[in-house]
Image: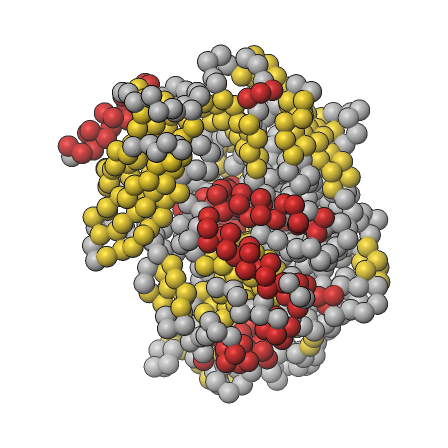
Amino acid sequence: MRDKILTIALAVATAALAQTRREITLTDGWQFSRDKAEWQTVSVPHDWAISGPFDKKWDLQTVAIEQNNEKVATEKSGRSGALPWIGEGHYKRTLAIPEGYSKAELVFDGAMAEPTVTINGQKAGFWPYGYNAFKIDITPYIKAGDNQMEVDLNNLEESSRWYPGGGIYRPVTLILTGKERIATWATFARTAKIDGKKAYIDVDTKVEGIDATDKAGVEITLYDRKGYVAAASRCDIEADGTVKTQLDVDKPELWSPESPYLYKLTTRLYKGNRLMDEQTMNFGIRTVSVTKEGGFQLNGQTRKIKGVCLHHDLGPLGAAINKAALIRQIKMMKEMGCDAIRTAHNMPSTMQMDVCDSLGMMVMAESFDMWKYPKCKNGYCRFFDEWAEKDITNLILNHRNHPSIIMWSIGNEIPEQGMRGGAETAKRLQDLCHKLDPTRTVTQGMDRVDNAMKTGFAGVMDVPGFNYRLHKYEKGLKELPQGFLLGSETASTVSSRGVYKFPVDIAAGKKYADGQCSGYDVEHCSWSNLPDDDWRWQDDYDQVIGEFVWTGYDYLGEPTPYDEYWPSRSSYFGICDLAGLPKDRYYLYRSKWNKEEHTTHLLPHWTWPGREGKVTPVYCYTDGVEGELFVNGKSQGRIRKNKEGRLDRYRLRWNNVKYEPGEIKVVTYDANGNKIGEQSRRTAGKPAQLLLSAECQTASQTPTLKADGEDMAFVTVTMADKEGTPCPTSDSQLTFTVEGDGAFQAACNGDATSLEPFTKPQMKLFNGQLVVIVRSTKQAGKLTLTVTDKKHNITKSIDIKTI
């Protein structure tokens, strides 16, 4: 108890002195314009393009997509989302600088794209890469009082292979300090080793504004979750401002996906006995390694990576980052059993990494989709020579303290993998990563495996990442010096939520007149495969250390296999759809990955007027090994998983069931014959009611939001018959109203071919469901969302508290 009392006393005492540092998130008070003629008030993060309208003219490209093995250029209408992100955007606001601060710095977590920052009419900074964080010392350009800041952005056509968004889509922070300060991104804390019941933490930092005559020192303190001091060190400052120390932690709590324990690391700069500056960050004690003998190890324990790739957009919210949406994403993936994400194919936001730290999600933090050789004529290739090392440096300095990050990626399917000099470039970037962070390995996703192995490109990587190319795994394991490989991008199975195509055939690149893909999870791209194929390699070969599935969620743009089809403006790869609703494939992965709970999931739905008597295969995704299917009480047979069958090792399938209205039910069993689950599907009647269910991040038995103007609730709307059975083919047009202390934000139904704007309060159901997103205001109280179906004269409301 004494240590905690001393800690609290110290915190109170230092808080009274620590008035020099202020960190202000610049959320409100922004003005935005596309042409500098008409301005509107917005909040940041902001995506100027997400309201649409969808139109094939936006970024209309006539190209041959090399990744799809295309040789002839054709029109690609929805490749980057068919939203108006092309062109210039302009932001301005007043910066109020109080008296008494010697140093002012702006930290942008990301702005799309090529941001030029001007302060009081003078250019203060520029950073071309829209995905990277950057900092600008604005001290020379400001005065005490009001200052004018402008940010000018420019997005070129054919600069992205997916929807990048437009605008200041991540937070901006103003940091005010005295002359004597702890440098931004200078503190680096890492676990040197864990030995028995003790952990050793190396900490470096750097201070500015201190000279040799100053009696200055730095105090570094590690606090546990309860506020007790876990370790502390008082350090001298070297002549160049650097500080180095080691903290010894007794009985450390280790960070892992299963137990994401976070400490607080506080760095304090003193001049004499006066506190000059203070920084606090989260810190997780953990070690990571990858070796031929142990595979991937976290805290010394071998485990297979169960990962998914995620693009940065948040579906109907666009690129504008939002913490509630990120939490929803990560929680949904964790419930599936996923333990890692790959930030494809770009640098992550700080907010996303904070969420992964706190919820326990490992991360491969990626950097580039291209180097010098272009995939898009106006892509990052324009900046690579001058900016690549600067971008890698910012990526690592900004993010290296996040325990969630387990490895860095320096590229995705880089064409240089098969070119002269490519291996040297890879080694140069990897060496830079090691210099800035010697604790993590480096990887990248390679798709031209033969070329990459021949040129030495694959051989220089710490972790060789194979994108698909399962038929090259054996060669890679035999010939590469590392002796292991990672499925850095896998599967690319395509499906549409609630859509089922007959007959059920395994197919590559299959297309249909409605622009949808089958939910039976048997369709993939010409260059990819099914989940079952990856699992064989991971289960049968210890040297395959895991996978990152393409993708966890659908995303805007890249509507393969419908790149040439209009309207189609978002992907089909997701395990969840664009609205965040799980597809059937979610439960296939859950049955394999979630070892804490049983899974029993039956498909398809059982409402098929006109299919009476026709063969309608039934699948069950389960962690069990055996199941029995019943149609209206009549057994269709008890079957068992078959290790030798491509689709029968991880699924239960009844391929000859004939449809008849009523009920199907499956009962599943474990290897010992014990029942572990059951599920039914019933034929739905006419639409009669709307079912509303709200997802909120505030812990409460009733739906509750924080009254901070940023928190969001995600309300799933389901059409059902009078008995409560979902109507799986309903496409009713719905309207939405919000009253009270909240506002309508967006809606999404997960249909890749829908051209309805996300930000208008109306939308059709897609296969009986959609999601409505509401945002809190800064007023505590209550908001009421009302959903109306005029065609069926149905209205349903849900109340959400704001506190």
| Residue 557 location, quadrant | bottom right
Q: Could you tell me if residue 467 is visible in this image? A: no
The residue closer to the viewer here, 440 or 224, is 440
Task: Give the residue drawn at x 30%, y 19%.
Answer: 274
Q: Is residue 489 above or below residue 329?
A: below
The percent coordinates of residue 259 (x first, y second) are 34, 53
Q: Position of residue 48 (x, y in %)?
A: 70, 37
Q: Which residue is more in the foreground, 159 or 358?
A: 159
User: Residue 176 at x, y = what percent?
Assistant: 48, 23
Task: Judge whether 598 appears above or below 778 on screen.
Answer: below
Residue at position x 49%, y 59% in the image:
442
Q: Can residue 436 be seen by looking at this rendering?
A: yes
Q: Residue at 55%, 21% (x, y): give it.
A: 139
Answer above or below: position of 105 versus 120. below
Q: Kindly indicate the quadrant of the structure image that contains residue 10.
A: top left
Q: Position of residue 672 (x, y in %)?
A: 34, 81
Q: Reply above or below: 225 against 375.
A: above
Quarter the N terminus occupies: top left
